[in-house]
Image: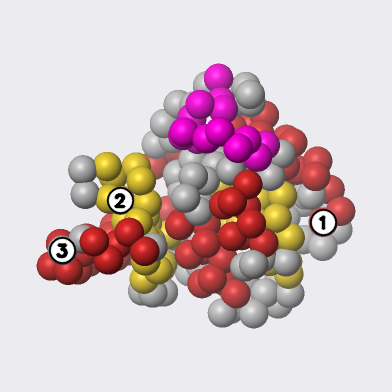
Amino acid sequence: MYQDRLDAARRLAKALDHLKGKRPLVLAIPRGGVPMGRAIADALEGELDVVLIRKIGAPGNPEYAIGAVSEDGSVHLEEEAQECRQEWLAQEIARQRELIDERRRRYTPVRSPIDPTGRVVVVVDDGSATGATMAAALATLRQRDPARLIAAIGVAPPDTLARFEALADEVVCPQAPSRFAAVGQFFIDFGQVEDDEVVRLLGEDAP
């Protein structure tokens, strides 16, 4: 188990040490991925921003992702989404788009998102169960023509990692347990990350 998100970030940064000197763009998935992204960006002498993807949770089980909405407006749905009422799904997609717009205004109020085109891009999250959110982030970023696209995840099951390998040039994940219930079970300390902390971390200049 990891002690906390920073413990996971240190292990990911060590595995990504070959990126030092390439000024990678580290794009963290809020909110849990942001403390990890800050630590990784600092360790690799890179630049930090967020990639805004909102999970679409299953009715009655919001933690189980049946799709995701990207900041560019694109929607990525899992097979399970076909079982949902289309009216509910349309309303949920609209709600998540509004939340994405709100988060961007709050997180980076004085600048636009950093352009990933031509950059070595590392997408960071603390963990992934179904892979819907990370997969949506990778698919969206691939359209922006990064020089190299890397997925860095604290923990995920093997079948989810296999999904990422089809979308990224490199996948780094120190823990890939076959028995997987929830991301939090692999962290001793898995406290909630608040918006204020995200804003503070994004405002810190990388050394």
| Residue located at (79% from left, 49% from top) | 16
The x, y position of residue 33, in whole percent, is 54, 44
Q: In this rendered view, identify the residue nearer to me: 107 or 141.
A: 141
Q: Is residue 87 above or below residue 42?
A: below
**Quadrant (top left, top right, bottom left, bottom right) of the N terminus:** top right
Q: Would you say 63 lies left or right of 85 here?
A: right
Which tag, 3 or 1, sits closer to the chain's start? Answer: 1
The x, y position of residue 73, in whole percent, is 36, 74
The stretch in magenta equals: 175-188
Which tag, 3 or 2, sits closer to the chain's start? Answer: 2
| Residue located at (52% from left, 46% from top) | 128
Circle 2 residue: 57
> What element does badge 1 sit on?
helix
Whether residue 139 can be seen here: yes
Residue 199: numbered disc = none
**Is 179 covered by the magenta stretch?**
yes
Q: In this rendered view, identify the residue nearer to me: 164 or 103.
A: 164
**How far apart are labels 2 and 1 at the CA level?**
34 Å
- In the current view of this chain or complex, which residue is farthest to the left? 87
Occupied quadrant, residue 96 = bottom left
Residue 19: numbered disc = 1
- For label 1, the crowd category at 10 Å Cα-Cα, with few meaning under 14, some 14 to 19 and many 20 or more, is some
Q: In this rendered view, identify the residue nearer to me: 68 or 207.
A: 68
- For label 3, the crowd category at 10 Å Cα-Cα, with few meaning under 14, some 14 to 19 and many 20 or more, is few
- Choose mark 2 or mark 1, whichever is in front: 2
The x, y position of residue 118, in whole percent, is 70, 77
> What element does badge 3 sit on?
loop
> What element does badge 2 sit on?
strand
Circle 3 residue: 85
Q: Is residue 26 above or below residue 125?
A: below
